Amino acid sequence: MIVEEVLSHYDMGDAESVTAGSGGTANQNYRVHTSTGDYFIKCRLPRLSSIEHVRLQHGVLLHLAAGNLPVQAPLHVRDTDETFLRDGDRLWEVTPFTVGHKFRGSKREIESAGLTLGRLHRCLESFQPTDFAANGPLHENRKQIEQSLQLAEPLFAEPELAGVRVAFHRAFDLLNREFYGSIELELQRSIIHGDYHALNLVFDPAGHVAGVFDWDATGVQIRLRDVVDGLIAFGRKEPEKSGGGNIIELTRPFDFDPGGVHCFLSAYHRVKTLSDLELRALPLMLRQRWLGIKLDPLRLGKVDRVAAVELMRDAQRPLQWLDETDALGVASLQSLLRG
């Protein structure tokens, strides 16, 4: 199926120009200008073409769009109730195109990212998930991290990675003592975005979020996971680097910036209150997420040894910051959020 054939199934007018765009890691994308406006067309590759999951994503987007959130709901195929076209083992979907600029690192953008995430979570509380959503994509867990640490042992023999090994095992030991099987089980779960970072947002000229994209990882998970992803993207020093259009920048070692952390967290907290339990869990989930970011490529066999050593270099930096702030406890985080 070609783009022109896809358009023939929608009331969008005739195509005047078609531009192939970046497909990210899982799809093929196109920007199309027609006689009725600009549209974004996504061709889902097979591994993200589960009918159940696509229907879940589209239901989430339609719900959020009805609540005036900055998302683009998929268009319905002409004379059907469906919001996608089947093409063998692939699916096509069409949404209006959102104009905006990438994240530039301003305080206003960081604040808007926090506010927007809070509004998304608040709106999604009234969304009724499907059975599939309750068993949706799993994020980092104890077993995956344990397997990944075992795979990393040969790498940790490199002298330059000795400090990384110590920091990673210390973080995992802390998760085993204080998170897995305890706090983890008590945290609120709901429909989340699942991949909330700078590359999946665009902003208007005033610095407000104009669009939130890439809902492929949506599902019922611990709500705090989105907050953690937001902090890693927006709560770092030189945050503008995380919006540079390259996912690799988000995985490079970084130092947290207390001002950015406060800006994002306090904005979110104004819209969707973080409980004391979530505040206690936040530093723990940041550790878990960072371990997953750095170790998953090893577990999935995506990098060779040379690339893996480079991936791990200085990876202890965010964990060191968390070790220093952890001693301050929940009261300090509460003070941070309440000014």
Image (cartoon, rainbow, N blue to C red):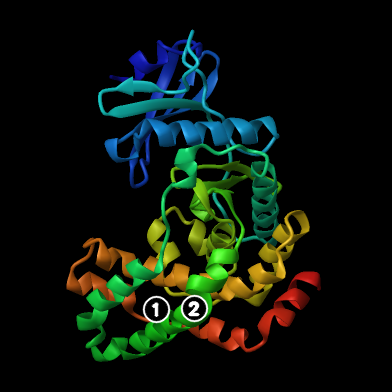
State the image coordinates of residue 283 (x, y, percent, origin top left): 57, 75
Q: Residue furthest top?
A: 79
Q: Which mark is residue 254?
A: none
Q: How many marks?
A: 2
In the picture, the quarter occupied by the C terminus is bottom right
Residue visible at 68% across and 42% down in the picture: 123
Q: Secondary structure at mark 2?
A: helix
Residue 16 in the figure: left or right of residue 121 = left
- Disc 1 marks a residue whose amino acid type is Ala
Residue visible at 41% across and 55% down in the picture: 138
- Disc 2 marks a residue whose amino acid type is Pro
Observer-nearest residue: 251 or 167? 167
Observer-nearest residue: 78 or 6? 78
In the picture, the quarter occupied by the N terminus is top left
Residue 2, compared with residue 97, is above or below; it is: above
> Dividing the picture into quarters, in which one does residue 24 lie?
top left
Graded by Cα atoms within 10 Å as few (under 14), some (14 to 19) or many (20 or more), the crowding at tag 1 reads many
Residue at which label 1 appears:
315
Q: CA distance from mark 2 to mark 1?
A: 7 Å
State the image coordinates of residue 254 (x, y, percent, origin top left): 48, 75
State the image coordinates of residue 103 (x, y, percent, origin top left): 57, 54
Residue visible at 48% across and 42% down in the picture: 133
> Dividing the picture into quarters, in which one does residue 151 lie?
bottom left
Residue at which label 2 appears:
318
Residue 30 in the figure: left or right of residue 64 = left
Residue 286 visible in the shown view: no
Residue 306 in the figure: left or right of residue 196 = left
State the image coordinates of residue 89 (x, y, percent, origin top left): 26, 28
Tell me whether the residue at label 2 lies in contact with that at label 1, contact meaning CB atoms closer than 8 angstroms.
yes
